[in-house]
Image (tube, helix red, strand yellow):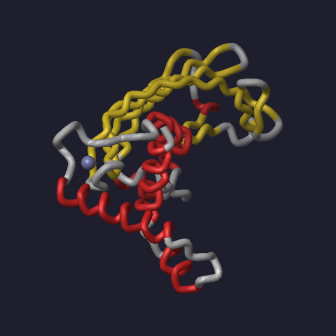
């Protein structure tokens, strides 16, 4: 049994009309998805499927919050999420797409919504997200600023990629710092 079995909706079992499926997306769900953008959250997802002549109309509504590191201080912050999306599904010979319509082989007949819901949530997160003014971890934010100033100094000294030691040190940098550096560098360009 796949770890996403409970997110399978068997379209062949649906009678004419509208059917509602609900999922609670918690830390366990994000652990199973195992993707870097979001690792913690607490959301409710509603999947409403209307069976129409020859196809299925699917409406996804996700509400709740994810917990992600703040760009300014790296402390966890709660980010409210409200997202809505629709999908049209038809049975076909194989998995695929036909314009905006998703094709699912009729002999399978199941729509798995686990990844679809995750993508909706990940897309709903703004590129830059920081605590409300005054809510950041001040000590950490100060440390980060110093670290970044230090990094900038190192770059001014101009070490080459041939320098094994420095190159290795750079590679072991926490990826979150890298992301933050990228954001700050982007900002400095304006
Ligand atoms: Zn913060």
Q: Nearer the viewer, residue 82 or 126?
A: 126
In the picture, measured across the screen, residue 91 lies left or right of residue 186, that is right
Furthest toward the bottom, the residue is 165
For residue 71, side relative to residue 170 (left or right): left
Residue 98: x %, y % from top left: 79, 27
> Residue 115 at what x, y percent from top left?
55, 44
**Along the line of sight, the residue nearer the viewer: 163 or 61:** 163
The image shows residue 60, relative to residue 43, as above or below, that is above
Where residue 88 sits, quadrant-wise, is: top right
Above or below, 131 relative to 179: above
Residue at the front extreme, as displayed: 157
Q: Quadrant of residue 13?
A: top right
Residue drawn at point x = 26 percent, y = 42 percent: 131
Residue shown at 55%/37% (left/top)?
Answer: 9
Q: Quadrant of the N terminus?
A: bottom right
Residue at the (55%, 57%) spot, across then down: 2
Residue at x-position 31% and y-position 55%: 74
């Amino acid at each position: 049994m796949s770890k996403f079995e409970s997110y399978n909706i068997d379209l062949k079992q649906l009678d004419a009309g509208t059917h509602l499926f609900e999922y609670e997306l918690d830390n366990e769900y994000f652990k199973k998805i195992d993707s870097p953008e979001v690792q913690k959250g607490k959301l409710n997802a509603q999947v409403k499927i209307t069976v129409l002549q020859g196809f299925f109309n699917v409406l996804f509504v996700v509400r709740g919050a994810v917990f992600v590191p703040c760009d300014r201080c790296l402390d966890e912050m709660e980010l409210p999420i409200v997202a809505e999306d629709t999908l049209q599904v038809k049975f076909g010979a194989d998995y695929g797409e036909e314009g905006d319509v998703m094709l699912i082989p009729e002999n399978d007949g199941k729509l798995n919504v686990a990844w679809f819901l995750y993508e909706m949530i990940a897309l709903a997160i703004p590129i830059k997200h920081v605590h409300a003014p005054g809510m950041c971890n001040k000590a950490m934010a100060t440390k980060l600023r110093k670290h970044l100033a230090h990094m900038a100094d190192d770059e001014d000294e101009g070490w080459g990629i041939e320098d094994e030691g420095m190159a290795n040190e750079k590679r072991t940098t926490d990826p979150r710092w890298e992301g933050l550096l990228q954001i700050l560098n982007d900002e400095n360009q304006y």
